[in-house]
Amino acid sequence: MVTYSSYNSLGSSIETGEITDKAVTITKLADDMLKWNYIETLTFNNDNSKTSNTLPAYDEYMIRFELFSAGANVDLRLRLNGNSGNIYRYRIANVTSGFATVTSNSYMLIAQTDDTSVRPPAFGVLFINGKTPADSGGCFGVCGCINAGYGDAITRLDFGLANFGSEVQLTSITLYASSGSYTGKVEIFGRNRL
């Protein structure tokens, strides 16, 4: 607890009081809300897909991944809340071929390893909002910075939407290979905004 005094322009004390721990508590709360909370790690060991079905409710999620495919030309795909309907839209900026836009699909393309090398990597970070806003058309937003391939690496910045309807909470995330399997890890974090 800190005591303080306020003075007027003549130097006379006009107020005396105490600052309680509430200010410190508010600052700590703000710091805590900006931190990412670890949720879980999904380990791919020659697996085609992995799902996190136990996501606690957060305002936003961060997914960090580093995966290696068992073969060439394997795409990394994403589904939310187990939905495989044609509700996914995305736009990808590719350094080799410009922009690609898909408006109705059963998954969101996260990384495309257009590489004839054996075991091309897919690594990057995704950010997903945790609940569809009431006034946004009911879409989960996804964005990320992705790098895929060896040598002539194909770097992509993904922007995507998944139309689920108004105020739906994200409860599960599935990452899977278009064919074959992956080896590597996916780390999932969550946090609330102020």
Image (spheres, rainbow, N blue to C red):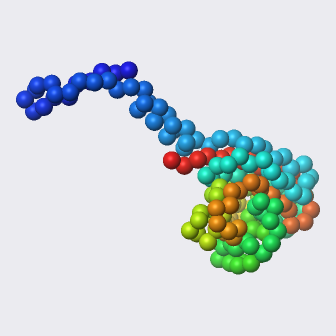
* Quadrant location, the N terminus: top left
Q: Is residue 5 left or right of residue 167?
A: left
Residue positioned most to the left: 10
Give 79 or 26, whichever is nearer the viewer.
26
> How many labels were placed on the picture?
0
Give 73 or 39, whichever is nearer the viewer.
39
Q: Residue 131: give x, y in percent of width and height.
A: 64, 58
Q: Quadrant of residue 179?
A: bottom right
Q: Residue 166: give x, y in percent of width and height.
A: 64, 66
Q: Residue 93: give x, y in percent of width and height.
A: 64, 71
Q: Is residue 155 left or right of residue 8?
A: right
Q: Can the viewer see residue 43 in this picture?
A: yes
Q: Is residue 173 above or below residue 97?
A: above
Residue drawn at x 80%, y 72% is 85
Residue drawn at x 87%, y 57% is 49
Q: Quadrant of residue 112?
A: bottom right
Q: Quadrant of residue 141?
A: bottom right
Q: Can the viewer see residue 143 in this picture?
A: no
Residue drawn at x 39%, y 25% is 20
Q: Residue 108: give x, y in percent of width and height.
A: 75, 68
Q: Is residue 180 above or below residue 51?
A: below
Q: Is residue 136 left or right of residue 86?
A: left
Residue drawn at x 83%, y 53% is 51
Q: Is residue 17 left or right of residue 23?
A: left
